[in-house]
Amino acid sequence: MLVKSFRFFRACLILLSLCFAILPGRANAVSNQLLLLLPDNFTLPDPRVSAWLDAASEEGVQITIMQDSQFEQAGTTLQQYQGLILPDQVHTNADDPLVTAIQNYALGGGQVMLVYDFGALTSTGFYPVPQSRFSSMAGVSYVLYDSLRGNMIGLGPVTGMGSTLRALQIPPGKSMTWTTSGSTTPATVNSAAVSVSASPTQALYLPASPSNPGGLSNYNHSAYFNYKTENGLASNISLDLGHLAKGAMVKAGKYTATSTNKSAKNPKGATTNAMTAAATTTDVLEGISGYVYGFLTYPSYVTQGTYSGTTLLTSPNFGLVAGYNPYGSGGVLFVNMPLGYLEGQTDGMPLHGFLHYFTTNILSMPHLSLEPRAQAGMVLNWHFCAEEMIQPAQYLKSIGVWNNGPFSIVVTAGPDDASIGDGLGINLSNNTQAQQMMQYLMSKGDNIGSHGGWDHDYWGANASETNQSTFQQYLSLNHQSVQSVTGKPDIEWAGPEGNTPTWAVTWLESNGYSGYYFTGHTGMAQTRAYRNGALLNPGIWAFPVMPFGKYATFEEFQEFGVSTTDVTNWYESLMDFVVSNRTTRLIYMHPLGASWYPGVLSTIFNYANGLISSGQYKWYTMDQLTQFDRKRLLVTWSATDTGSSWTFSAAQPMSLQDVTWLLPKNKYQAPVVTGGSATVVTTDPNNWLVIAGAGTTLTFTSAKM
């Protein structure tokens, strides 16, 4: 109830600030804001809208809500806003005057992010004939209900050049080389759960109609992710095809994905760290993939016609998935995927990635870093699952692995493992050797938390959304055992086999946990995880696991024959990615599997130490990042255009210490601190960094380029 009240209060504040913003004489009041367009009389709060607001907050940019009638009446004052977002799901109907007003905004120089089913229907609830009224802005024909009917929305893999995927914040390992790029149809169309056979003349479609314009009403993307994995194989998986349709392959446009290696420039001319790093490597076509599942599938409207813009993502079967199209004096980032919907269904990477791309590569907006001092790094989460992990952990101690870190260690503390009574568990409360290992790890600065669940495999195989009354006791037992041995709060968690029921996260939140390993939202930095279309637990942060294609652990690398060269290169490229983007990710290991690869461990820790010594990288624990990000959520800030320069103001009720702004050098000159305490870092090749010191308020200015 408190969370709902807070969201309602926040929505009221947003609307109130908007009313003041559009008054005469206030043209510069919200110049660091994006606009999110909603229908008149839209009821807030709504999780489909808060998904955008929360993602923007985590990406370090700000969004103002505007309703249709205000937008149509605002005229040239709209140019004070950095850009316009036309979201999916919540604004499927649009009348012709609104369409014209949006077109005029872009023609006059505005930058627009047009997402999926926005305005797919007329004001009277019908599909326009013969195509979307936004097709000219998008640069391709789409929403082709008049000609394609039930075959209008395809469901299939999404591909892009590796450098472009990195620019979209899709890390190495979250995509795989696309080996069937020359074929109109892969031999199998891989759903996120299983491979669904399709003939060369058939494809999968989401049925759509005026009552379901985006085809999403009966489609549950998260149903393909059951958060349970074992040895790289998904368990208990079934795919309900009742809401899908197999149909003949339709005629779709063919578009060539653009490589950002050719020129490390974005459509507006700004160079990005990710592009610069990618420019030194060979660029290949890749498909977005997921841990265990391989190539993932996404809905997209079939597109037709020649595209003159910059192609970012494509569908092998259905055409253009994303691209940037110049339009008049402005431009349109067309994203043919339901970003807000996917965020709500535990796949927030596309929303975050495109929001980052729009605000960084196209708009060159200032960002508030999600990391303290904008310091790149990773969380290395070690899973102690059963008694068999203790001796390998001793071996890792002997070769110096634990001298690195700090790490996030999680322990399944019960006496059993696969079944009650098997005696294969760590039995932490009665295992002197295990207790000594935990004390040693704490002496190295590591956090010790819970891996479930009391009995690892038993929890992984049996805990579900329907048996909280049976399995909650195992959370309590594990929690008590860890705390009694460590003498410290047990505040980090990982679900055995990735099995994370929603009730378990609610229990964690209510018992003081700050962060947890999660197999949803893979590929992302830490996030407040949406599930089942809502933010159920805003007080705890999820740390999505980072996979290397279908695998993530040394046990899986060995079982499925992944070469040590590929494994080493992936770990190093992932470190390069987080450094070049000043971001964070989580990887995980087991002491047992890691003990088989001492050479790889030595190489990757040496590589990390080189980055650490130059100040580019660090190892984080989940709690370190969570505590900072909780503080960061309380920061209020604004950037006001004063004519020749920008004035930034910020406040935090307790302290701004280590809160950091990144100002793109292609738009801003070196900042000057005018009030409060801060350090300006000038050595980053792409951004000025303003790192706040002690104090609750800060002001600084930056002249325009």
Image (tube, rainbow, N blue to C red):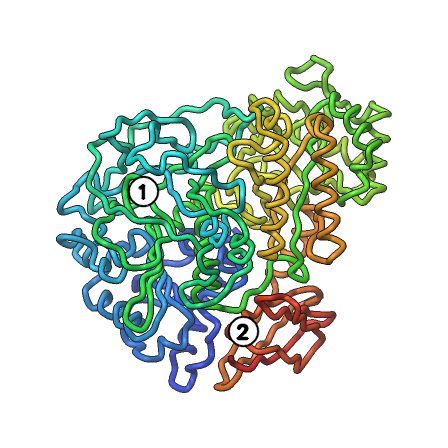
Q: Are marks 2 and 1 in contact (CB under 8 Å)?
A: no
Residue 491 visible in the displayed image: yes
Q: Position of residue 210 (x, y in %)?
A: 20, 47
Q: Which amino acid does label 1 sit on?
A: Leu
| On screen, residue 686 above or below 3 | below
Q: Where is residue 231 in the image (x, y as percent from the top left)?
A: 58, 24
Q: Residue drawn at (44%, 72%), measured in percent from left and top?
A: 16
| On screen, residue 115 above or below 240 | below
Q: Nearer the viewer, residue 5 or 433?
A: 433
Task: Identify the residue under disc 1.
Answer: 216
Q: Quadrant of residue 421?
A: top right
Label ID, residue 638:
2
Q: Residue drawn at (75%, 42%), measured in percent from left and top?
A: 447
Q: Where is residue 405 in the image (x, y as percent from the top left)?
A: 76, 44
Q: Nearer the viewer, residue 174 or 267?
A: 267
Residue 477 visible in the displayed image: no
For the residues labelled 2 and 1, the Cα–Cα distance comes to 36 Å
Q: Residue drawn at (41%, 24%), measured in percent from left and top?
A: 238
Q: Position of residue 540 (x, y in %)?
A: 61, 47
Q: How busy is the neighbourhood of tag 1: few (under 14 within 10 Å), some, or many (20 plus)? A: some
Q: Which amino acid does label 2 sit on?
A: Ser
On the rendered structure, is 395 left or right of 77? right
Q: Which of 374 and 10 is in front in this view?
A: 374
On the rendered structure, is 50 left or right of 594? left
Among numbered discs 2 and 1, the one appearing first in the sequence:
1
| On screen, residue 162 above or below 420 | below
Q: How busy is the neighbourhood of tag 2: few (under 14 within 10 Å), some, or many (20 plus)? A: some
Q: Residue furthest top?
A: 422
Label ID, residue 569:
none
Query: SS of the residue at dot 2?
Result: strand
Q: How many labels does the image show?
A: 2
Q: Nearer the viewer, residue 105 or 260?
A: 260
